[in-house]
């Protein structure tokens, strides 16, 4: 397995390193997105790669782009990543990169929740609502919601956590028409994906989509889609309410980090033990196999 902590493509201008992805300009209308093996937990990037994780995320995203392409256009160009880098850089992009349309990111993340957990559960306990959406009384932690809800979040600056906002706030930021379209598309994507995942024994508790506009103002789905990083995947056979069900992939890392009483969940990250890395890697591989029915193409 070819592991990549950070890419270094010298033949293209670097646009920036995100927590997990490295972006390069391809001409002035496309970008090369390389998904590294970095893992972030509590929004802090760990120092060790999870070998192959980036390939899993990239191939999961591709899988969903194809499955959900009839709902909304996406950023894929069909250009092979191998064709836009130098020959000695091909190894860095194999199986883990895409050449995407360079879009203008919409600075509101489209979060859809089918179950009440995480920050949604916290907000509900405090106010009975999530992002201003009033919910029935008496819901238990991790309970399935009567129907999926759209709970937008303002994209935070580097190092900050995203902030839940109301739909009215989202309308003020990007306009009613685009906000409504984003909400309706996001709910459709989540609904179709979660029905499919259920048939494979996986609950998609919630997920986050990112959208961008092309030069004609057409809304496209971009970034990563319905991966274990952008969603909470729960194995259906161990699902229960009243607890925070273990997530498919990052649970070993999170559990380990929670045992470190002297780490304040801010950078720098503590070192991860080898067994935590190995178990996490196995989970990512299991996730793609369970979801797509196929082994990772390495
Ligand atoms: N087609 C696209 N056009 C422009 N920007 C994109 C596109 N697809 C993804 N991005 C952006 O590229 C970055 C991906 O890197 P990532 O590691 O996910 O960053 P982050 O730390 O912000 O989550 C994100 O900022 C995302 O919004
Ligand atoms: Mg991201």
Image (spheres, grey):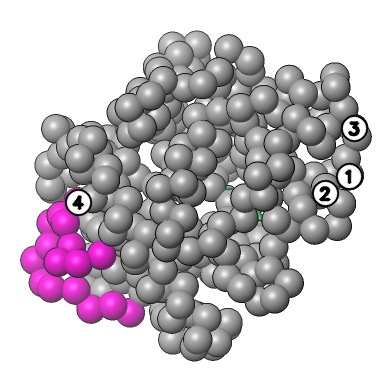
The structure residue drawn at horizontal position 18% and vertical position 62%, both measured from the top left corner, is 145
Q: Secondary structure at mark 3?
A: loop
> Residue 64: x percent and y percent?
44, 46
Residue picked out by circle 4: 142
* Quadrant assignment for the N terminus: top right
Residue picked out by circle 3: 10
Q: Secondary structure at mark 2?
A: strand
Q: Nearer the viewer, mark 1 or mark 4?
A: 1
Image marks 4 and 3: residues in contact by CB distance under 8 Å? no
The structure residue drawn at horizontal position 46% and vertical position 55%, both measured from the top left corner, is 69
Q: Secondary structure at mark 4?
A: loop
Residue picked out by circle 1: 13
> Residue 62: x percent and y percent?
51, 41
Was residue 26 drawn as part of the magenta stretch in this picture?
no
Write down the region rendered in magenta: 132-148
Was residue 135 drawn as part of the magenta stretch in this picture?
yes
Residue at disc 4, CB closer than 8 Å to ligand 2: no
Q: Find residue 284 and report its image quarter.
A: top left
Asked whether 203 or 259 is in front, the reply is 203
Residue picked out by circle 2: 25
Q: CA distance from mark 4 to mark 2?
A: 41 Å
Q: CA distance from mark 2 to mark 3?
A: 11 Å
Q: Earlier in the sequence, mark 2 or mark 3?
A: 3
* Mark 1 Cα-neighbour bin, 10 Å: few <14, some 14–19, many ≥20: some
The structure residue drawn at horizontal position 50% and vertical position 11%, both measured from the top left corner, is 274
Residue 159 can be seen, yes or no: no
Q: Secondary structure at mark 1?
A: loop
Residue at disc 1, CB closer than 8 Å to ligand 1: no
Q: Nearer the viewer, mark 4 or mark 2?
A: 2
In the rendered view, tell whether residue 270 sits above or below residue 134: above
In the rendered view, tell whether residue 291 sits above or below residue 135: above
């Amino acid at each position: 397995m070819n592991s990549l902590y950070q890419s270094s493509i010298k033949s293209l201008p670097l646009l920036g390193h995100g927590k997990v992805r490295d972006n390069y300009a391809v001409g002035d209308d496309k970008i090369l997105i390389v998904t590294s093996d970095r893992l972030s937990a509590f929004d802090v990037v760990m120092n060790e790669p999870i070998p192959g994780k980036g390939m899993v995320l990239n191939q999961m995203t591709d899988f969903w782009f194809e499955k959900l392409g009839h709902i909304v256009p996406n950023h894929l160009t069909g250009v092979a990543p191998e064709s836009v880098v130098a020959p000695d850089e091909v190894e860095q992009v194999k199986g883990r990169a895409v050449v995407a349309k360079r879009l203008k990111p919409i600075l509101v993340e489209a979060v859809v929740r089918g179950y009440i957990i995480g920050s949604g559960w916290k907000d509900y306990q405090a106010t009975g609502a999530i992002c201003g959406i009033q919910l029935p009384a008496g819901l238990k932690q991790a309970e399935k919601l009567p129907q999926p809800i759209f709970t937008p979040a303002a994209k935070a600056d580097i190092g900050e956590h995203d902030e839940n906002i109301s739909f009215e706030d989202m309308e003020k930021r990007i306009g009613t028409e685009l906000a409504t379209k984003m909400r309706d598309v996001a709910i459709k994507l989540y609904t179709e994906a979660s029905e499919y995942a259920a048939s494979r024994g996986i609950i998609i508790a919630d997920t986050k989509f990112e959208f961008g506009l092309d030069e004609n103002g057409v809304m496209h789905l971009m970034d990563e889609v319905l991966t274990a990083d952008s969603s909470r995947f729960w194995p259906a056979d161990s699902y229960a309410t009243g607890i925070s069900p273990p997530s498919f992939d990052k649970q070993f890392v999170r559990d380990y980090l929670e045992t470190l009483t002297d780490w304040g969940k801010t950078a720098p990250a503590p070192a991860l033990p080898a067994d935590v890395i190995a178990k996490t890697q196995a989970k990512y591989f299991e996730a793609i196999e369970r979801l797509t029915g196929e082994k990772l193409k390495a």
